[in-house]
Each structure stands twice: as structure tokens, then as C-alpha cells.
Image: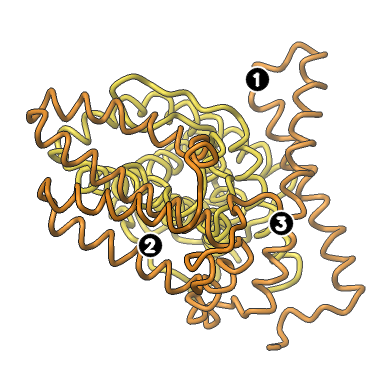
Amino acid sequence: MKTRDLVHVALFAAIMAALGLMPPLALPFVPVPITAQTLGVMLAGSTLGARKAGLSLLLFHLLVAAGLPLLAGGNGGLAVYVGPTGGFFVGFLPGAFVIGWLTERAWSRLSVPLAFAINVLGGIGVLYAVGIPWLSVAAHLPLAKAALGSLAFVPGDCVKAAVAASVAVTLKRAWPLIQPPRPAGATSAPPSSTPAASPAPSSPRR
Amino acid sequence: MSLGLYLHRDSPLHALPAGAKMLALLAAGTGLLLFRSLPVVSAALVVTLGLYGLARLRPREVAPVLRLSAFVLGPLFLLQAWLSGWELALGTVLRLAVLLLLATLVSLTTRASDMLESLQRAFRPLARFGLSPARLGLLLSLTLRFIPLLATWLREIQEAQRVRGLERNPLAVLVPLLVKTLRTADTLADAIDARCFDPEEPS
């Protein structure tokens, strides 16, 4: 990794923190606040690519676990992870990774609808796949109820995915960072729930 | 570092190494998940409050940190009571409260720098993926330096777009923020390279 890549990793972790400064919305009866921070997850994934986005989110997690109040609403410390919503924060990392991985593969033909689908898969699918079982175990709720409660956030998250998708496509024109995937790329973390639906894109040129 | 939750006191809990406290928290979390009967959880709550006394933290100092947790636990209690009876609800919410209290206690009694150090040690196996301690140190200090700066930029851009009547358009805020960040990243990387920081060198 070059110095430039390291700096990208660090600055996107800082962007995550800056987005956390926007005040969260708390809904009655659902123990998860709505934040702009998942937007940061989507932006990191679709701007940096899998490896750098994953590292960036890992860095962010390190700082939060160390007790810095960087999560939305000035939340931080290890208490975040033992709480009922901890899974959604833990899901940030695989979520960003999956978004980055898919974006790299779709890079040469990235359009807003495609980027939106990618962001929904990674930013909602993966995040919820980690967060809902965690909520169910930690809060001792039946899985179906936990999932039902989380449904309240899907509309907001879809808006965020749409925003992230248009930002990603605009940024691809203004400041492209991702290169089309190398063959046999050694990736850093296993994509926890890689959707089987994505057809292997025949990377035409590299 | 003033950004953390740490409150300095002269107590045995503050003196414990950070890694030990985090492992104890992990053990407590697992234990409470396995034994979740009401008597066990109540005993754990008493012990936890005792630990707060031992750490010489006054309730008034701790209250603001815990307010957000209460925000989550209140609705959860109502939901649980409605779904499966108030007794189970009480047990679940108490267990979460104990865990949140314990985790907050770890954050309150450990300096962020100590915590980062032991977390770095825990993540040492990641060196294989290109995250050597020297790099991790650079990354952490860069991020800490840039959080206040990025927050300022975000506010500036929001203000500028409000003048144009675009403050409701997230694209008009995020794209400039990202381009500005990425442009800064390039100059910053050049500056670091000019000072001969070698990211490949294990040190």
C-alpha cells in the first residue's frame, strides 16, 4: 500500500466521524437511532474499494472502542458494542467491504441504478444481516420481531443508498480512485455474506 | 487527550491494565448471556455499582455518559413488556443495563491512549494484511488530526450551500466535501513522502 492509500484510509475514518456529528433521529418503540453514519459506510465502500474501505472502517472501530465519542449522538466506548444496536456498528465493516468489492467489479459500467443496488445490498443487506441477529440475542427478542422493528429504517436507508449512489457516480467522473479489479486479487477480509446473485463480471480490460 | 471519556481518579480500577479490563468485560458479557436469571442479573448490578464506588466515580459525573443508553433501554423495556411480559422485560433490560454500565466503566477508567495500545496489540495478527504497527500509528494520528478539520469543512460547505439555497441537497454538500478531502489526501501523501516516511518498512 502506498502512502496515498494510507492517507485515504485515515481521512475516510475521519469522514465517518464528521458525519456522526449530524444529530440522530430517535423513533419511539425502535431501539435504534437513525444516523447519517451509514451514509459514510456507503461512501467509503463506493469511493475507496473493498480493501481500503474495510481498513478505514476498522480504524474507525478502533477509535470508537478506545472510548472516543465518534458515533452519532456522541456515543462511543465499549458500551456501544455490548448494547442492543452493537451489531449494526459491527456490520459497518463487512458492509463497506462488500460495497467496495461489488463497486470494483462494476466499475467500468457503474451507473446510478447499479450503484444504488450495490449500496442497498451492502449498506442495508449486510448491515441488517449482522445487526438483526445481534439485536435479537442482545435484547432477547424473537428474530422476526427484531427484523420487523428494523424495517422502520429501510426507507431512510434507501434514501441514503440513493444519495450515496449519485455521489459515487458523480465522484467517479470528478475524482476516480478505484481501478478495475486485478485478476487474482488477494483480498484482506472474507466478504461475510457475498450475494450470490451478482454474476461474475467479465472485466473486459485492465 | 481530551476527546475520550476518561475521568482520572486514584483507584485500583484505574491502575488495572487496559487489556485485563477489556477481557473481564468480554467474560462478563458472555457470562450474563449464559446465565440470564433475574437473581444473577440483580447480583451483577449490585457488584457493578460497587465497582463504580471502588473507582470513586460520582453519579453526577457518570449520568451524562449514560443518558443515551437510557434512551435505548426505555423503549426496549416497553416493547419487551408488551411482547413477553414485564418479568422477562425487566431481566433483559437489567442485563443490558449491567453490560452498558460495565463497558462505560472500562471507558471511564482507561485512557484512550492505553486502550488504543492494547487494541493495537490485539490486532497485531492483521500485520499480514498490510497493517504494521508503524502504519497503524500513522493512521490513528492522521484520523485524530483530521476529525475536527473535516467537521469544520462540513459546516463551511453547508453554510456555503445554504447561501445558494442548496442546503437540502445532500449531493451539493457531500461531493464538495469528498473532493476536498481527496485533494487534501494527495497533498498530504506527498508531504509525508517528502519527509521520507516509508510505509513498507517494518519498525
Drawn side of residue A143 relative to residue A119, left or right = left
Residue that carries the numbered disc 3 in the rendered image = B1
Image location (x, y in percent) of residue B118: 53, 74
Residue that carries the numbered disc 1 in the rendered image = B169
Return the mark for residue A191: 2
Q: Amino acid at mark 1?
A: Asn
Residue occupying the point 40% across, 38% down:
A120
Cα separation, mark 3 vs mark 2, equals 35 Å
Q: Is residue B203 visible?
A: yes
> In the picture, which chain is yellow?
A
Say which chain tag 1 marks. B
| Other-residue count near label 1 (Cα within 10 Å), few / some / many at <14 / 14–19 / ≥20 | few
Q: Nearer the viewer, mark 1 or mark 3?
A: 3
Q: Amino acid at mark 2?
A: Pro
Of the pair A105 and A32, the residue shown nearer to us? A32
Disc 3 and disc 2 on one polypeptide chain: no
User: Of all residues shown, which one is farthest toward the bottom?
Assistant: B202
Q: Amino acid at mark 3?
A: Met
**If the image is split into quadrants, where does the N terminus of chain A sit?**
bottom right
Q: Earlier in the sequence, mark 1 or mark 3?
A: 3
Residue occupying the point 73% across, 79% down:
B199
Which SS class for mark 1? loop
Q: Is A79 placed above or below B74 here?
A: below
Image location (x, y in percent) of residue A155: 38, 24
Cα separation, mark 2 vs mark 1, equals 33 Å
